[in-house]
Amino acid sequence: MPFEAKKFIVQAEEDIRERMGKDHAITAVSGGVDSFVAATLAARAVPGQLHIVYVDNGLMRKDETGKVKAVAKALGVDLKVVDARKRFLDALKGVIEPETKRKIIGEAFVRIFEDEAKATDVKFLIQGTIAPDWIESGGMGRDTIKSHHNVGGLPEKMHLKLCEPLRELYKHEVRLVGKELGLPESIHQRQPFPGPGLAVRIVGEITEEKIHIVQEACDIAENEIDAAVAAKKMERPWQYFAALLPSKTVGVRGDERAYQYTVIVRAVRSLDGMTANFSHIPPEVLERISTRITNEIRTVGRVVYDITNKPPGTIEME
Ligand code: XMP
């Protein structure tokens, strides 16, 4: 049976009301489509019982915090911004192993939500978890591919009860719900962004310098691909970004030897993120991305394009 967004919305709002009763909930928006759709459903289902927060964990894309604030303002959402940059960076200091990173991030989010909840006597945490999140986190007896921050990354003991209205949906269905709810296209068609943010796009240890490099490189890759799509040079990939490898390589800057970072550009076609094929980007677009990254980020000396499908690769690096 084809997915019917209208029917889903009616049922999901009823379920939220039934599960929450008169209790209050906290919900976090990250700027991504899943969290915005979950928060919008909840705001319609239990108005007056919802506290909406945005956690700035220092691992967001360039200008993300400003963009999220602007969308919230345009939608009339009363958004509380929590500046947790130092908390996340301190907790991630020296951590290299991907699953450890994910667990630290999942736990930090929940502890922040609990701190926020204490002040307001909140009982529930509403999350925008979707099907691939729990499937890849080892749901229903499967192998754990990666612990999504909002599922396998959650701490064992938490004081808030979970409410996950999008749990059975895939990304394309969430987009249909977002559209039906009247969210702006810039939200419901937004490319996916992982909950752990740029942490999973920095292979190995996270430092402020590396976060800055990935923010700039992602911004260049996104803008150049957006421009190429607008000029009809290529179809819009399902997801597209840049990531940073832990190894430096040798190059030349002017007449001098350089030993600098390697950025990896990734763009994929997919329906639901469970499988993906790398996008065939025109060579001149790749060349522009590479030239801009090495010119504008002076600590990057090499740019490579990822031509791996999923499987065997995953979309993110970690
Ligand atoms: P992978 O890397 O597993 O990613 O092929 C599949 C899709 O999921 C996103 N992703 C996440 N989303 N929390 C999320 O909300 C996470 O922990 C997480 N890890 C990956 C990824 O960006 C891609 O769209």
Image (tube, rainbow, N blue to C red):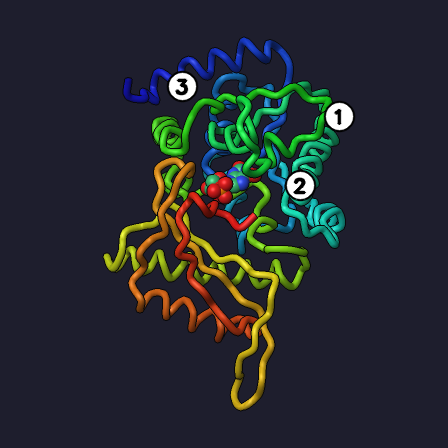
Query: Looking at the rendering, in which quadrant would you find the N terminus?
Result: top left
**Of the image marks 1 and 2, the number of the one nearer the N terminus:** 2
Element type where label 2 sits in the image: helix
Element type where label 3 sits in the image: helix
Residue contact between numbered discs 3 and 1, judged by CB atoms under 8 Å: no
Q: Amino acid at mark 1?
A: Lys
Q: Which mark is residue 9?
A: 3
**Of the image marks 2 and 3, the number of the one nearer the N terminus:** 3
Where residue 18 appears, x then y in whole percent? 54, 9
What residue sits 51% from the left and 64% below the top? Answer: 263
Q: Residues within 10 Å of mark 1 (few under 14, many from 20)?
A: few
> Mark 2 and mark 3: span between their CA atoms?
30 Å
Where residue 79 appears, x then y in whole percent? 58, 36
> Mark 3 and mark 1: span between their CA atoms?
30 Å
Residue lying at the far bottom in this picture: please name it. Answer: 255
Judged by depth in the image, the label closer to the viewer, 2 or 3, is 2
Q: Amino acid at mark 2?
A: Ile
Q: Is residue 106 visible?
A: yes
